[in-house]
């Protein structure tokens, strides 16, 4: 990023409305600027990583890589925009839940009120994560193409010996019927 663009962005961040025309030109010229800066999910993710890692650069970098790997595992090659949004939510809630677990585990002896608060935060983060996972799984299932009649028939084809019937017919018995 050149120095002039950096100054422009700093001025805009500080609320200088006089730079708005030039800012719009810069955002139109380079879509990555507004896509990254305006991605609140990415901003929240970065904030959570900073919160969890503190000054530990190794932990921060490792968390970013873990999140990237999780996103790759959860995103199909041809993911829809909705699936990508839900993957972002699943990874964010995973990070929140893991952070709450770590805080609770490292809390040590504390007051009953503090312990209760940590447990409530942990439970809430866990519920949010499960809700996000469920939503992603449901959308993936709904978007999966329905099986063709041929695929269904192949699934019904039970190659091999016919199932045995261990019941013995009773001579002279008539089946009951209406």
Image (cartoon, rainbow, N blue to C red):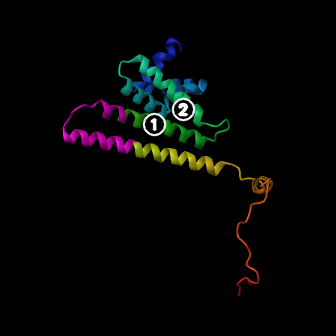
Which SS type dominates the magenta stretch? helix
Q: Using the numbered discs, state the Cα–Cα distance from disc 1 to disc 2 in whole angstroms.
A: 10 Å
Dots 1, 2 in contact, CB < 8 A: yes
Residue reaching furthest bottom? 178
Tag 1, which secondary structure?
A: helix
* Nearer to me, 106 or 36: 106
Please report the residue visible at 62 percent of the width from the left and 49 percent of the height from the top.
141
Q: Quadrant of residue 51?
A: top left
Asked if 157 appears above or below 133 in the picture, the reply is below
Q: Quadrant of residue 110?
A: top left
Please indicate whether residue 102 sits to the left or right of residue 172 in the image. left
**Is 110 in the magenta?**
yes
| x then y, percent, for residue 6 | 48, 16
What residue is disc 1 on? 94
Residue reaching furthest front? 171
**Is 111 in the magenta?**
yes
Asked if 35 appears above or below 158 in the picture, the reply is above
| x then y, percent, for residue 150 | 81, 54
* Nearer to me, 80 or 93: 93
Please report the residue visible at 47 percent of the width from the left and 22 percent of the height from the top.
62
Residue stretch rendered in magenta on the structure: 101-125
| x then y, percent, for residue 73 | 59, 33
- From the image, which quarter does the C terminus lie in? bottom right
- Packing grade of label 1 (10 A; few <14, some 14-19, many >=20) is many
What residue is disc 2 on? 70
| x then y, percent, for residue 16 | 41, 25
Please report the residue visible at 50 percent of the width from the left and 29 percent of the height from the top.
67
Tag 2, which secondary structure?
A: helix
Residue reaching furthest left? 111
Badge 1 or badge 2: first in the primary sequence: 2
Please report the residue visible at 39 percent of the width from the left and 41 percent of the height from the top.
125
């Amino acid at each position: 990023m050149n120095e002039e663009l950096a100054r422009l962005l700093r001025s805009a961040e500080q609320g200088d409305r006089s730079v708005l025309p030039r800012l719009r030109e810069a955002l139109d010229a380079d879509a990555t600027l507004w896509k990254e800066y305006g991605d609140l999910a990415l901003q929240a993710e970065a904030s959570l990583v900073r919160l969890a890692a503190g000054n530990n650069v190794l932990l921060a970098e490792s968390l970013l890589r873990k999140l990237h790997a999780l996103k790759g595992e959860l995103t199909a090659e041809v993911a829809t925009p909705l699936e990508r949004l839900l993957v972002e939510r699943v990874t964010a809630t995973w990070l929140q839940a893991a952070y709450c677990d770590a805080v609770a585990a490292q809390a040590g002896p504390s007051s009953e009120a503090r312990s209760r608060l940590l447990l409530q935060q942990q439970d809430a983060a866990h519920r949010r994560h499960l809700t996000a996972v469920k939503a992603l799984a449901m959308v993936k299932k709904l978007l999966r193409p329905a099986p063709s009649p041929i695929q269904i028939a192949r699934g019904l084809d039970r190659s091999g010996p016919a199932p045995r019937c261990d019941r013995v017919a009773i001579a002279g018995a008539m089946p009951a019927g209406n």
